[in-house]
C-alpha cells in the first residue's frame, strides 16, 4: 500500500502577534516587515514619519468594514507582502460594542448580551476566530506575513503546583486570546530594557536608556513563544526587523546588500 498526500512542508510566511504597552513601538516594529498594508481599528500610524508610513485602509467603524477589507486582500491582485492588524485589542472593543448594540434586548453590558451566561463573550470570540481564519487564507494562499498588534495588560496566574504570580498578557477577554496565541508562529513581547537602582531595604527605581527588546521565548513574566529556536532577547533598532535572521521567509525577502 502506497501512502498518499505526503510532502515535506515548505517554509511559509510568518503569522505572529506583537504585544506591549502603549507607545512602546509595536506598530513601528510591525511596519518593518516587507511591503505592509495596515488594517486600522485605531490610528497608530502617526508615530511613523510620512515618508516611511505604509499604506493603510480607512479606519474601521464597524465589523463589516473589517471583513470587507480582508476580503479585498484575499480576492484582489496586489503586491503587499504583509498585513498588519492594529490592534486586536481595539477590534475586541469594537466587537463587544457590536454584540451589545445588535442584541434586541438592549443589554447594558457584554455579560448580559445574548441571554448572558458567557454567550456574549463567546460571540466576540467567534468574531476573532473569523478574523484569524481570513488571515490564515492570506498566509497560505497569498503568502503574506500576518502581524497582529495587541496592547498588554497584567493577569494573575494561579497554577495548581506553583504560587500565584502576575504576568503580562494580551488585553483581550480570555476566550478570544487563543486566536492570537495558540496557532501562531510567534508571540513577541516588546518592552524597554530596564535596570533597578537602590540600596538594600530602599525602594528600587527603574532606569532605562530607551533600548527596546523583543522577548519571543517562553517565560513566566509574559506571554511569548516562537517556532524559530530563538532563546534570547532581541534588541530592536529603529526601523530594523530583528527577526530577519531567524525566519526563513524573511531571509529570502531581505534586500541584497549593495557594493
Image: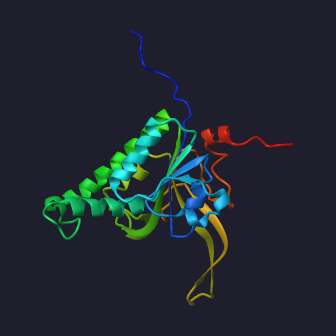
What residue lies at 49% left-to-right and 65% top-to-bottom? 221
Q: Nearer the viewer, residue 101 or 154?
A: 101
Q: Count the labels in the image.
A: 0
Is residue 252 visible from the viewing direction of this image?
yes
What residue lies at 18% left-to-right and 60% top-to-bottom? 103
Does residue 28 appear to the left or right of 1 in the view shown?
Answer: right
Say if 210 sits above or below 42 in the image: below
Location of the N terminus (image quadrant): top left
- Specify the farthest residue to the bottom: 202
Which colour style is shown?
A: rainbow
- Specify the farthest residue to the front: 58
- Specify the farthest residue to the right: 259
Q: Nearer the viewer, residue 143 or 197?
A: 143
Q: Nearer the viewer, residue 223 or 88?
A: 88
Where is residue 259 shown, x and y percent of the image?
A: 86, 42
Where is residue 62 shown, x and y percent of the image?
A: 34, 57
Is residue 183 visible from the viewing direction of this image?
no
Say if 98 sits above or below 78 in the image: below
Where is residue 127 shown, x and y percent of the image?
A: 31, 51
Say if 212 sits above or below 71 in the image: below
On the image, which quarter does residue 137 sit in? top left
What residue lies at 49% left-to-right and 22% top-to-bottom? 7
Q: Nearer the viewer, residue 27 or 164?
A: 27
Amino acid at each position: 500500500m502506497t501512502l498518499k498526500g505526503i510532502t515535506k512542508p515548505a517554509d511559509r510566511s510568518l503569522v505572529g502577534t506583537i504585544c506591549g504597552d502603549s507607545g512602546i513601538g509595536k506598530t513601528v516594529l510591525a511596519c518593518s516587515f516587507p511591503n505592509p498594508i495596515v488594517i486600522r481599528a485605531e490610528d497608530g500610524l502617526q508615530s511613523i514619519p510620512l515618508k516611511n508610513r505604509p499604506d493603510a485602509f480607512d479606519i474601521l467603524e464597524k465589523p463589516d468594514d473589517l471583513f470587507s477589507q480582508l476580503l479585498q486582500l484575499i480576492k484582489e491582485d496586489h503586491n503587499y507582502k504583509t498585513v498588519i492588524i492594529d490592534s486586536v485589542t481595539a477590534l475586541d472593543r469594537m466587537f463587544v460594542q457590536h454584540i451589545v448594540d445588535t442584541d434586541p434586548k438592549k443589554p447594558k453590558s457584554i455579560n448580559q448580551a445574548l441571554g448572558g451566561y458567557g454567550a456574549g463573550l463567546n460571540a466576540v470570540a467567534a468574531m476573532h476566530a473569523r478574523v484569524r481564519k481570513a488571515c490564515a487564507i492570506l498566509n497560505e494562499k497569498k503568502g503574506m506575513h500576518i502581524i497582529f498588534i495587541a496592547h498588554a495588560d497584567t493577569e494573575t496566574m494561579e497554577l495548581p503546583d506553583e504560587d500565584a504570580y502576575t504576568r503580562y498578557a494580551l488585553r483581550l477577554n480570555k476566550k478570544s486570546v487563543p486566536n492570537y496565541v495558540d496557532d501562531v508562529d510567534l508571540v513577541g513581547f516588546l518592552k524597554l530594557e530596564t535596570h533597578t537602582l537602590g540600596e538594600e531595604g530602599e525602594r528600587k527605581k527603574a532606569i532605562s536608556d530607551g533600548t527596546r527588546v523583543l522577548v519571543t521565548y517562553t517565560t513566566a513574566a509574559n506571554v511569548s513563544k516562537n517556532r524559530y529556536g530563538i532563546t534570547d532577547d532581541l534588541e530592536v533598532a529603529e526601523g530594523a526587523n530583528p527577526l530577519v535572521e531567524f525566519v526563513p521567509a524573511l531571509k529570502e525577502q531581505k534586500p541584497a546588500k549593495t557594493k
